[in-house]
Amino acid sequence: MPVLTRVASQAQPFVPEPITDAEAAAMFRATLNLFRLWGVSDDQAATILDLPRRTFARWKAGDMGRLGRDGKARLSNLMGIHKALKLVFQDPTRGYTWIKAPNDAFAGRSALDVMLGGELTDLMRVRRYLDAERGGW
């Protein structure tokens, strides 16, 4: 039987690198496509991203400004929701329609209804739920 030897570990805690402006711009473009697939209106998208409607329209047209930390966190959570849906549902269409379906976990509201609360924590709530459903953390 092999003998286990204790090895001193100097493991450092994981500290993610900040999201760059270029990465945020790429996530914004991906999010626009995601919103289209989910059937999210521009007004709803502006609420989810916490942007004034006119700013959202300008950014959607390609004249994107700089996103702050909150905006980058919102995009990151939306990408996490998309990834989790891809893992939970084999058929992408089911994931796209799930967003608008009533859900007991949200007191009969849909995930979109939750996200339309407009707070970053609303996006995080949906992401945490999906991560737990898929067995992630």
Image (cartoon, rainbow, N blue to C red):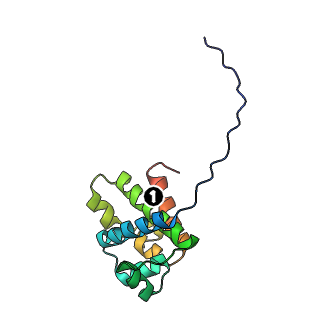
**In the image shown, does 97 or 41 lie closer to the viewer?**
41
12 sits to left or right of 32: right
Figure check: 134 above or below 69: above
User: In percent of the image, x 30 and y 67: which residue is there?
Assistant: 97
x%, y% of residue 122?
Answer: 52, 71
Quarter of the image containing the N terminus? top right
13 sits to left or right of 108: right
Find numbered disc 1 in the image and state the secondary structure of the residue it sits on. helix
Figure check: 48 above or below 53: above
Find the residue positioned furthest to the bottom. Answer: 54
User: In percent of the image, x 29 and y 51: which residue is there?
Assistant: 90
72 sits to left or right of 59: right
x%, y% of residue 100?
Answer: 35, 71
What residue type is disc 1 on?
Leu
x%, y% of residue 121?
Answer: 56, 70
Task: Give the class, few, some or many, for how many residues have Cα within 10 Å of label 1's Cα (few <14, many ≥20).
Answer: many
User: In percent of the image, x 58 and y 70: which residue is there?
Assistant: 69
x%, y% of residue 38?
Answer: 32, 70
Q: Which residue is mark 1?
A: 130
Q: How many marks?
A: 1
User: In percent of the image, x 42 and y 65: which residue is there?
Assistant: 27
Is residue 33 among the parts visible in the rendering?
yes
Is residue 101 among the parts visible in the rendering?
no
**In the image shown, does 41 or 17 lie closer to the viewer?**
17
113 sits to left or right of 6: left
Find the residue positioned furthest to the top. Answer: 1
Q: Quadrant of residue 120?
A: bottom right
